[in-house]
Image: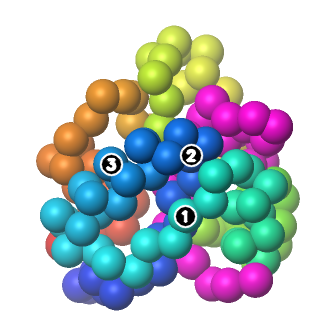
Amino acid sequence: MAIDMNMQILIVDDYKTMLRIIRNLLKQLGFNNVDEATDGGMALQKLREKQFNLVISDWNMEPMTGLQLLKEVRADARMKELPFIMITAESKSENVVAAKEAGVSNYIVKPFNAATLKQKMQGILGAF
């Protein structure tokens, strides 16, 4: 099944530069329906108001971390199947394990490029 290039994607990062980078990478890949949130609380609010097809979230944020956001999403019956990619600067195995246990769909370690993002997205969404 072909992937919908108009799918709604929510990117979450408290660092505006990173939001811009991820948005640009998604644009390079052909995705333009991108919304953003600067923390987990704002992301949750947006997720409850609107239907998204993918969340790409940073791990390290205040006051709600990406891991806490992921747990909230997985605890919500309406969103528990929502594809969720976690981005982190740390590749510590305990972080990967914690994210997997919380139900993350895929995991990206910074720095990364469009090819890495595409590969991780294809891993959960299929080819595009």
Label 1–label 2 contact, CB within 8 A: yes
How dense is the environment of label 1, judged by Cα within 10 Å: few (below 14), some, or many (20 and up)? many
Quarter of the rendering occupied by the N terminus? bottom left
Q: Residue at x 24, y 68 (%)?
A: 27
Which amino acid type corresponds to the residue marked 2 in the rendered image? Answer: Asp
Which amino acid type corresponds to the residue marked 1 in the rendered image? Answer: Glu
**Residue range of the region highlighted in magenta in the rendering:** 49-71
Give how far across and how far down residue 69 sits, in percent.
74, 49
Residue 104 visible in this rendered orientation of the protein: no
Q: Which mark is residue 13?
A: 2
The CA span between labels 1 and 3 is 12 Å
Mark 3 highlights which residue?
Answer: 21
Q: Nearer the viewer, residue 16 or 78?
A: 16
Count the numbered circles shown: 3
User: Helix or strand or loop: what does disc 3 sit on?
Assistant: helix
Does the magenta run of residues contain 50? yes
Give how far across and how far down residue 94 sits, in percent.
61, 15
The CA span between labels 1 and 2 is 8 Å
Does the magenta run of residues contain 2? no
Q: Which mark is residue 36?
A: 1
Q: Residue at x 57, y 53 (%)?
A: 12
Q: Residue at x 57, y 78 (%)?
A: 52
Give how far across and how far down residue 11 sits, in percent.
51, 58
Classify residue 2 by image quadrant: bottom left
Q: Nearer the viewer, residue 68 or 14?
A: 14
Which amino acid type corresponds to the residue marked 3 in the rendered image? Answer: Ile
Give how far across and how far down residue 111 sits, in percent.
30, 28
Label 2–label 3 contact, CB within 8 A: no
| Sequence-earlier tag: 1 or 2 | 2
Whether residue 51 is situated above or below residue 100 in the rendered picture: below
Q: Nearer the viewer, residue 76 or 19?
A: 19
How dense is the environment of label 2, judged by Cα within 10 Å: few (below 14), some, or many (20 and up)? many
